[in-house]
Image: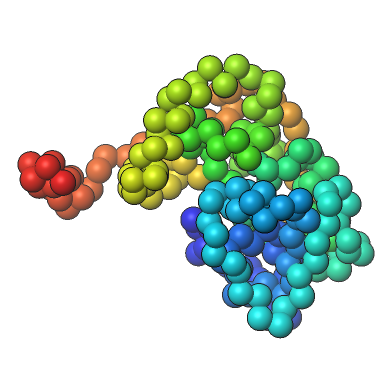
Amino acid sequence: MFFPKKITSIRPQDNVLEIGPGSTPHPRSNAFLEFNFNTHLDKISQRGGVAKEPVFGHRPVYYYDGGKFPFEDNQFDYVICSHVVEHVSDPAEFLHEIFRVGSGRGYLEYPLITYEYMYNFKVHLHFVKFDFDLMVLRYLPKSDTTFSEFAAVSALFNKTLEHGWSDLCAANKMLFFEGFEFHRPFAVEKTYEIEKLLPHLSFVVPKKAVRKFIGQVLNKLGL
């Protein structure tokens, strides 16, 4: 999760469900929903290669095989779903289930198409972007594009991640990731318009003077 500070409206009495917490469950979550992976290697792959197992404590963990969640309507007051929607086969069905069991409240986070353009993780099935003006989540399945033509470029950038070159995304999170709280259900629709999946140009801001100076020093030192 890249924007934990955006989670601000969980009330003390809320029953919170977290979907796919990876290796870092949110401390406020009361219960967890995990996909029932076929193998341990599949689970590690979906976590982006992170082998560390989560610590749930005494909080219950439920498993499902996709489709309908194993919960009653409005069983929870809030749902945390960070970096999961891009993995599921049907984002519209998935969000419908989140709204059904979570009283229409929660937090959603995912990588943007800019991030996928560089790294293109195979376990990410869709490009995703929320339209804050129209209150609609749009998605485009990668399988419906010619994105595979950039496989060599993505392989190169993945190699940079292996060597710790993650500072570009870390320093410009708003360009590569998106997260937001919602307080009511919203529309979900498929799109084929790439322009509707791009982050706003206002997020491209000048580098701060201190960071720019440090970068220049490191470049001169060859670091």
**Is 23 in front, or is 211?**
23
Q: Left or right: where does residue 187 sit relative to residue 152?
A: right
**Is 61 in front, or is 28?**
61
Q: Left or right: where does residue 17 sit relative to residue 86?
A: right
Coordinates of residue 57 in the picture (x, y in percent): 66, 81
Which quarter of the figure has residue 133?
top right
Coordinates of residue 41 in the picture (x, y in percent): 64, 51
**Is 95 in front, or is 62?**
62
- Give the residue at the far right of this rendering: 72
Q: Left or right: where does residue 193 sit relative to residue 72?
A: left
Q: Left or right: where does residue 219 sit relative to residue 33?
A: left
Coordinates of residue 207 in the picture (x, y in percent): 25, 43
Q: Is residue 163 visible?
A: yes
Which quarter of the figure has residue 196?
top right
Q: Total label count? A: 0
Q: Is residue 94 above or below residue 15?
A: above
Coordinates of residue 113 in the picture (x, y in percent): 53, 33
User: Which residue lies at the image location 32% right of the left edge and 40% below the top edge?
Assistant: 205
User: Which residue lies at the image location 39% right of the left edge and 30% below the top edge?
Assistant: 156
Color theme of the render:
rainbow
User: Which residue lies at the image location 55% right of the left edge and 49% below the top edge?
Assistant: 48
Q: Is residue 163 above or below residue 201?
A: below
Q: Is residue 26 above or below residue 163?
A: below
Q: Is residue 106 visible?
A: no
User: Which residue lies at the image location 86% right of the left edge and 68% below the top edge?
Assistant: 75
**Is 59 in front, or is 91?**
59
